[in-house]
Image (spheres, rainbow, N blue to C red):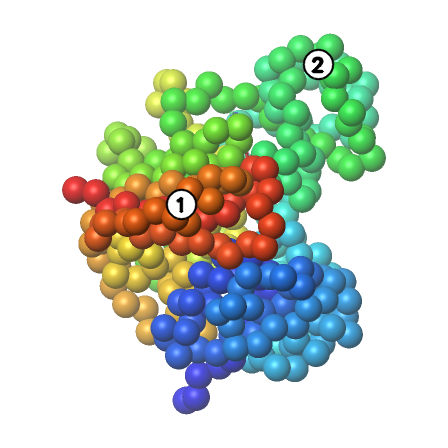
């Protein structure tokens, strides 16, 4: 059977790394992105520029490919659904509909009897008055947030006066978990009960942005096992095909909570490129293109550091040793708080 041509919606660093993994497997890729400078076009076989709701442009893209996947979850559901009528979209659009909405996502997780932090939907400012027991908390937009964008820390009700909050957007108020640690699990599901699962990754955030990811995570056996069980349960329930990531909180009493699900490859999994025989990106391509599932083998422990904003300038001029792997995302513009690259160091 000839290999399919893969369409990838989204052309940032995740799209780039997916295209690089596809090249290795001799799978051709076409990128669709709303940014004319999308870095992933440097690594793909074709590029279509258009808005995510421009169905004419989308069709031009879909005509060139056999299967469609995506690098981020905020693509309009209507767009994914339209595409899925013509060619297969994996993971399927219904997964995105749940996960791109923080309330639907948390309801879904709780219905599986998996713990999340306490939360409530907020549609008007006056509703916050009645949920004082969720304070201190974080008020988050229900859609379109990432890297801490659209999040407001609320310790007491008077904090609300200091933010300029547009309540027409729809919010969730989450109780703040007293964090001991954050971990994530990256898992690729190939089919019913067929998984490649990476070991838990320990994550350090600053200002709600991921800074470091490390394996092995320093966690108890109980958390190690529970996080894996919950992750596969979530993937199974979603009938997911491809790579997904589950982000977890561990509180000071060693309770495990699911924070959120990313229906895609994930920043914390970048270390799998160098620390495993098969990366999260390659596994995603293998699963959505129905290629062989190769048993996972860990090659080394590792630490990944995100390079944010101006830091990239220093990293571009550095020399690296054999155990260091620098990735420049080739973004045209350096912006404050923007992820510009990462460095993975293999450690013993
Ligand atoms: P994003 O979509 O921006 O990744 P998250 O909900 O994962 O949003 O929040 C980003 C980070 O903010 C988390 O990784 C964590 O460090 C912190 N955070 C978010 N929600 C909570 C919470 N309820 N309790 C404690 N920390 C939180
Ligand atoms: Mg997150």
* Residue lying at 38% horizontally and 37% vertically, measured from the top left: 212
Q: Which mark is residue 315?
A: 1
Residue 226 at least partly seen = no
- The quarter of the image holding the C terminus is top left
How many numbered marks does the figure carry? 2
Image side of residue 103 versus residue 210, left or right: right
Residue under label 2, please give it. 159
The image shows residue 23, relative to residue 275, as above or below, that is below
The percent position of residue 195, horizontal first and vertical second, equals 35, 59
Image side of residue 200 versus residue 321, left or right: right
Q: Quadrant of residue 173?
A: top right
- The quarter of the image holding the N terminus is bottom left
* Residue lying at 74% horizontally and 62% vertically, measured from the top left: 51
Assess disc 2: are there few (<14), some (14-19) or many (≥20) residues with their C-alpha within 10 Å of its C-alpha.
few
The percent position of residue 201, horizontal first and vertical second, equals 34, 41
Q: Quadrant of residue 193?
A: bottom left
Q: Give the Cα separation between the discs numbered 2 and 1.
A: 38 Å
Judged from this view, the residue extending furthest toward the front is 317
Query: Which label's residue is closer to the chain start, 2 or 1?
Result: 2
Image side of residue 321 versus residue 291, left or right: left
The percent position of residue 89, horizontal first and vertical second, equals 58, 69
The secondary structure type at the circle numbered 1 is helix
The image shows residue 117, relative to residue 191, as above or below, that is above
The image shows residue 2, relative to residue 132, as above or below, that is below
The image shows residue 200, relative to residue 24, as above or below, that is above
């Amino acid at each position: 059977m000839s290999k399919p041509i893969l369409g990838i919606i989204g052309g940032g660093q995740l799209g780039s790394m997916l295209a690089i993994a596809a090249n290795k497997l001799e799978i051709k890729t076409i990128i669709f992105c709303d940014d004319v400078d999308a870095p992933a076009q440097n690594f793909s076989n074709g590029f279509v520029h258009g808005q995510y709701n421009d169905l004419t442009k989308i069709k031009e893209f879909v005509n060139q490919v056999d299967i469609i996947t995506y690098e981020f979850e905020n693509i309009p559901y209507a767009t994914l659904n339209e595409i899925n009528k013509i060619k297969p979209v994996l993971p399927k659009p219904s997964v995105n509909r749940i996960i791109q909405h923080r309330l639907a996502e948390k309801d879904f997780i709780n219905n599986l009897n998996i713990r999340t932090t306490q939360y409530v939907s907020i549609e008007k400012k006056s509703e916050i008055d009645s949920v004082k027991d969720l304070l201190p908390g974080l008020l988050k937009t229900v859609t379109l947030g990432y890297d801490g964008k659209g999040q407001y820390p609320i310790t007491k009700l008077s904090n609300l006066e200091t933010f300029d909050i547009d309540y027409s957007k729809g919010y969730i108020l989450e109780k703040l978990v007293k964090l001991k640690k954050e971990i994530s699990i990256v898992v690729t599901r190939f089919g019913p009960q067929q998984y490649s699962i990476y070991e838990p990754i320990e994550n350090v955030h600053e200002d709600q942005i991921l800074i470091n990811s490390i394996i092995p995570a320093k966690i108890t056996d109980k958390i190690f096992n529970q996080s894996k069980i919950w992750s596969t349960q979530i993937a199974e329930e979603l009938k997911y095909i491809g790579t997904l990531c589950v982000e977890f909180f561990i509180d000071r009493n060693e309770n495990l909570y699911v924070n959120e699900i990313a229906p895609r490859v994930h920043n914390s999994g970048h270390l799998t490129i160098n620390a495993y025989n098969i990366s999260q990106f390659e596994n995603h391509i293998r699963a959505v293109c129905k290629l062989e599932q190769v048993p996972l083998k860990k090659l080394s422990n590792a630490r990944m550091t995100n390079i944010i904003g101006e830091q990239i300038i220093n990293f571009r001029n550095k020399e690296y040793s054999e155990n260091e792997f620098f990735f420049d995302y080739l973004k045209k513009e350096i912006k404050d708080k923007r992820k510009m690259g990462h460095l993975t160091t293999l450690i013993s």
